[in-house]
Image: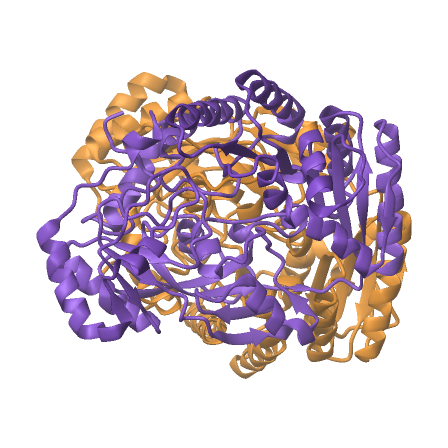
Chain colours: A orange, B purple
């Protein structure tokens, strides 16, 4: 199924018009129907065309979000929650029109419970904002997807990133939520206890549901202690396969690596050019260890031995902050470095995740596919989790090239699913990956549909996302 | 609401009779209606009276389980999944009668993927069986609730135990499930990738759902590497409050403690008497560290300093296996040691979990309550998670005493919930804690009801558990 076929939702013109009328009156200047604002809220980083909402409401509280959903429920008008628009699969598009609820003004940090290693925030708080706020507490929020996303958006898409191998994903780091249901009721899921066996895990049901079941209006998040010491470095390998073997050994021996990132040969070339570095231009692992002075040294030494045993190295590591920051700045700039490989091109960032034993094969087949299709597409990956990204560079004005990239992505997803993996490790489904849901989940998709129908019977919550039209 | 009021489910006599007829014919000797077998399958460790199923089917495959559910769906006959019956809140009782599906013959270990640190098992495999099987692989399954429970049952109740502070709970360690839905369809949730953002987290929805949404017929579980070295020991403290302060500091500084267990004064007295030990008879922490030789020594030293700074100690630790095993054997025998405090008494083991900052206050108030009510009830706790157990000893033939214990449990749960905690950290709701669901979850319980109604419209899946009758 091509991407363009899965993103249709019928417009309820009368309902949308009625909701617009009510909301304009209620929210005045905080409700916009101007095209520029609407276009900004349908910002998409895919090759999907933007599908604009009919209006954008800038809410300042959960009660206001609930009020809007109530109006929209009455008139069967779609609502699409919006953070800062860094999602990568068309999550904020409005295929059936409706109201975009902009949550960025809900950016208060409500509480930090240092003794409990948790905090309570509004959904518009970004991860950088939170970490700046935490700076003097000895704590930090470890999930880092690269972009300075909002925490509400990160929860909605079950985001993760470089630290997930040690600290988990948003699945593991959201303790509790406040959310507005499809009927406009405000509920609280979970609590501040670190664990619970009290009933259905609604928190985990809402994390990753991309606004299709409820709108997150408050999050209670786990925090981690800032490690006493950090060590890290870059380690070159003769092949992706050798690097992957080293990763498997590292994980298997329980070395508590905090980050272990693969960059393939093309990716390293891009990095060197963009960040003016002189790393060897073959596959490499970027690694980082958190712990005490003694343990980060021990971990780095052990990793060096593992790397050496797999034809890698030399592993040059440091515990100095400045050098580490240079290294991770380069890693974080991988997207821009990749783009610079082909000036003027648009980049499509796609991700899959496979069992780590299949990672080398999956990347090798993907590299072969890239070569065969004549694409330029560097690979970077959170390989401790078996998760990798391909940045496919394309001329977005060339329909033939878009078709080729779409075909490449379809093959990549089918490959990952065939290897008992998933069509997305951390970007989410949105519109872009709906076409792979059926092959990944089989009959379980009917259970998802039943949950969606039960919790959003009028299909007003971010419609046209996650679940493809029923007839396949 | 008293326990006895929440456990009623109307019997569908005609449907049950019809299902019994079909299943007897189909399963022959593997289907029993004998009273002894039925009573064994309604085994309850609470003070709830046993409520027997009408028949017990010993299934040997997921396909057989699906077949039974299909028959029962046709006739609207309840089905109750059964492992080894170690659950603590009446989960396997049959308040509306029906069929107990005994899954213990489904005890095959289907695959161990050492490179991926995962395995695939049938639900009747017990954790000890799995760990014995893994002995030569360098891997182990870390979740240890004490009892040698089945892994299916542990997933269904979202179990955890002593290692959870480091390795997480069943929530974190189940990668994927095969399950039979209420209509008898077999679905697969999740996959073998370590993370995914592909749609609703059905795995987490089913983990902890206690057989009320689907019956688990296969599990893919995360495994951990056996640590190179283990150190541990017992550390006395002058008060629960001092011990708890030491726990908070330990967690907050990111010391990766593998186990950190509190036993209160009465608990230590019971332990000494039962296991013929001579620990000081005040509150103590049992701790264990996993890592390399160097790191477990460093961790133990650091913990000793933290303990000393909180008036605790001396902390005598060892990395010798024999001494550690003696220590943890004593800890694991805490239930029997507690029972021996009052010969002939029945023990009711209840658990709550609170934010760790509230733990000292919660235990202090609970100890005061125990004293005031004249109960004998030692306390042990997985305090790194804020989770603790009270073993209330009672004469099960004395209705007045049962009432008092029930009152005590109600106050304990209300206290935990008021402290932003939960009425159960790891035992589950079953029948025993249904009365606390509404006060813990508020309006979110309606979302749970909607999910239950959508996935089990005829209410045949372990009815009368988790969700209390609607009218409160």
Question: B194 or A323: nearer the eye?
Answer: B194
Q: How many labels does the image show?
A: 0
Q: Where is residue B460 in the image (x, y as percent from the top left)?
A: 22, 51
Q: Which residue is drawn at 23% across and 62% down?
A: B33
Q: In this view, does A116 lie above or below A200?
A: above
Question: B34 or B4: nearer the eye?
Answer: B34
Quarter of the image where the N terminus of chain A is located = bottom left
Q: Which residue lies furthest to the left in this view?
A: B14
Q: In which quarter of the image is residue A417?
A: bottom left
Q: Is residue A7 visible?
A: no
Left or right: B192 in relation to B385: left
Q: Can residue B308 be seen in this view?
A: yes
Left or right: A31 in relation to B325: left
Q: Is residue A303 above or below residue A193?
A: below
Q: Position of residue A35 (x, y in %)?
A: 38, 36
Quarter of the image where the C terminus of chain A is located = bottom left
Q: Where is residue A131 in the image (x, y as percent from the top left)?
A: 69, 35
Q: Where is residue B370 in the image (x, y as percent from the top left)?
A: 57, 22
């Amino acid at each position: 199924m091509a991407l363009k076929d899965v993103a249709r939702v019928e417009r309820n013109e009368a309902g949308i018009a009625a909701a617009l009328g009510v909301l304009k009156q209620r929210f005045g200047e905080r409700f916009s129907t101007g095209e520029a604002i609407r276009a900004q809220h349908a910002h998409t980083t895919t090759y999907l065309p933007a599908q604009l909402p009919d209006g954008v409401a800038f809410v300042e509280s959960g009660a206001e979000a609930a009020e809007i959903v109530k109006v929209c429920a009455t008139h069967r008008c779609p609502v699409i929650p919006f953070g800062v628009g860094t999602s990568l699969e068309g999550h904020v598009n409005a295929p059936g029109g409706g109201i975009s609820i902009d949550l960025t003004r809900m950016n208060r940090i409500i509480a930090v419970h240092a003794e409990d290693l948790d905090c309570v925030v509004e959904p518009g708080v970004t991860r950088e904002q939170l970490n700046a706020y935490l700076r003097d507490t000895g704590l930090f929020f470890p999930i880092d997807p690269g972009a300075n996303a909002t925490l509400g958006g990160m929860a909605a898409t079950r985001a993760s990133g470089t630290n997930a191998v040690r600290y988990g994903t948003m699945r593991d780091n959201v303790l509790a939520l406040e959310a507005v249901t499809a009927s406009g009721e405000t509920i609280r899921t979970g609590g501040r206890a670190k664990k619970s066996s009290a009933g259905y895990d609604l928190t985990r049901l809402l994390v990753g549901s991309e606004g299709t079941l409820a709108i997150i209006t408050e999050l209670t998040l786990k925090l981690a202690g800032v490690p006493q010491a950090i060590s890290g470095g870059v380690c070159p390998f003769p092949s992706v396969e050798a690097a992957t073997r080293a990763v498997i050994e590292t994980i298997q021996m329980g070395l508590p690596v905090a980050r272990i990132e693969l960059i393939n040969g093309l990716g390293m070339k891009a990095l060197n050019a963009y960040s003016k570095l002189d790393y060897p231009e073959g596959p490499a692992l970027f690694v980082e260890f958190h712990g005490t002075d003694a343990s980060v040294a021990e971990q780095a030494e052990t990793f060096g031995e593992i790397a050496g045993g797999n034809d890698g190295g030399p592993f040059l590591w440091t515990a100095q902050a400045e050098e580490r920051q240079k290294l991770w700045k380069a890693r974080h700039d991988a997207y821009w470095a990749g783009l610079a490989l082909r000036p003027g091109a648009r980049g499509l960032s796609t991700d899959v995740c496979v069992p780590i034993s299949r990672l080398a094969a999956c990347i090798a087949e993907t590299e072969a596919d890239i070569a065969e299709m004549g694409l330029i597409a560097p690979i970077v990956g959170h390989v401790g989790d078996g998760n990798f990204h391909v940045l496919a560079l394309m001329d977005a004005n060339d329909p033939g090239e878009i078709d080729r990239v779409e075909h490449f992505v379809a093959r990549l997803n089918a490959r990952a699913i065939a290897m008992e993996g998933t069509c997305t490790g951390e970007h989410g489904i949105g519109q872009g990956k709906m076409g792979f849901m059926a092959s990944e989940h089989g009959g379980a998709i009917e259970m998802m549909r039943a949950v969606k129908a039960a919790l959003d019977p009028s299909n007003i919550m971010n419609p046209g996302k996650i679940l493809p039209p029923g007839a396949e």
